[in-house]
Amino acid sequence: MLRLEDAAARVAAPRSRPGQFTMLLAQPSLHLIRRPMSIHDEGDGWRSYMVKPVGHASGELVALRPGDRVEASPPFGNGFPAPADLGGGPLLLVGGGFGIAPLHFLARRLDALSPSMEYTILYGGRSSRDVELDAVAGVRGEILPSTDDGSLGFHGTCVDLCRDLLRRLGAKARQATVLTCGPPAMMAALHLAVRDLVRDVYLSLEEVMACGVGVCMGCVTRTRNGTVPICTHGPVFRGADLVGIDGGREHV
């Protein structure tokens, strides 16, 4: 994991919304296309990201050293709903792996703007090596880690943990809102497991994209309003607005 400070934020400084993403590219680079990265945190003149080296371009970002240059475009997309639109029930922030990044930003924003709102972070990985607790350090909400192999926290997936927590909430679960980001299979399983148990589900879809402005149509998903680019209509979608996200019933 590497956290990058975004020097461009010192110039443009539009205040980002949790769930939005920035297109980054190390300079100089062997590549032409920037890579989308969810914002992990934002402060006065800086932004931070969690970068996982899955290819050459992201590998270049991880290899950066202090003082190196990064091309960073302004934040794109629609983020998670504003705190006032999340209802008054429990908030469950469910992140898988590096999908925890935008949820940490959401928690930080809730701490700053809505200190009375209660939330719980459920942070899952295959093993303890996949759960970077430092990435969520300092937030107000309770943090519940889970690992598939039981090496840290709850023994099972974060989907299992979420179901367990909803059972313990009893009747209050009906007022809960689940907000999630992580591997597509994890989010699909989570949506399938909780969609009929809670007030609402919001998913931040991770997808490879080239432009971030809906031109290349490299990232699309099916919704009740047709097939739309994830970069401009998302990446955060209300679960009930997506069609076939969990491979089960369609929501139309």
Image (cartoon, helix red, strand yellow):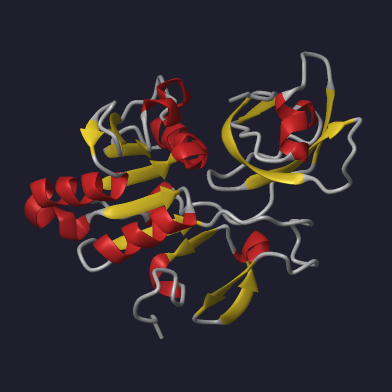
Residues 79 and 162: in front is 162
Question: Which percent across, then down, holds residue 146?
Answer: 29, 35
Asked whether residue 92 is in view, the answer is yes
Question: Which percent across, then down, holds residue 249?
Answer: 34, 80
Q: Is residue 119 above or below residue 176?
A: above
Image quadrant in which you'd find residue 201: bottom left
Residue 237 appears left or right of 190:
right
Residues 231 and 107: in front is 231
Image quadrant in which you'd find residue 124: top left
Kindly give the residue lying farthest to the bottom in the view shown. 252
Q: Is residue 11 above or below residue 162?
A: above
* Image point (33%, 57%), residue name: 190
Question: Which percent across, then down, holds residue 54?
Answer: 65, 39
Q: Is residue 69 above or below residue 71?
A: above
Asked whether residue 90 is in view, the answer is no
Residue 247 appears left or right of 161:
right
Could you tell me which quadrant the C terminus lies in?
bottom left
Kindly give the residue lying farthest to the front in the view shown. 149
Residues 15 and 103: in front is 103
* Image point (75%, 23%), residue name: 63
Kindly give the residue lying farthest to the top in the view shown. 66
What is the count of numbered marks? 0
Residue 48 appears left or right of 204:
right
Residues 22 and 33: in front is 33
* Image point (54%, 52%), residue name: 79
* Image point (72%, 36%), residue name: 58
Could you tell me which quadrant the N terminus lies in?
top right
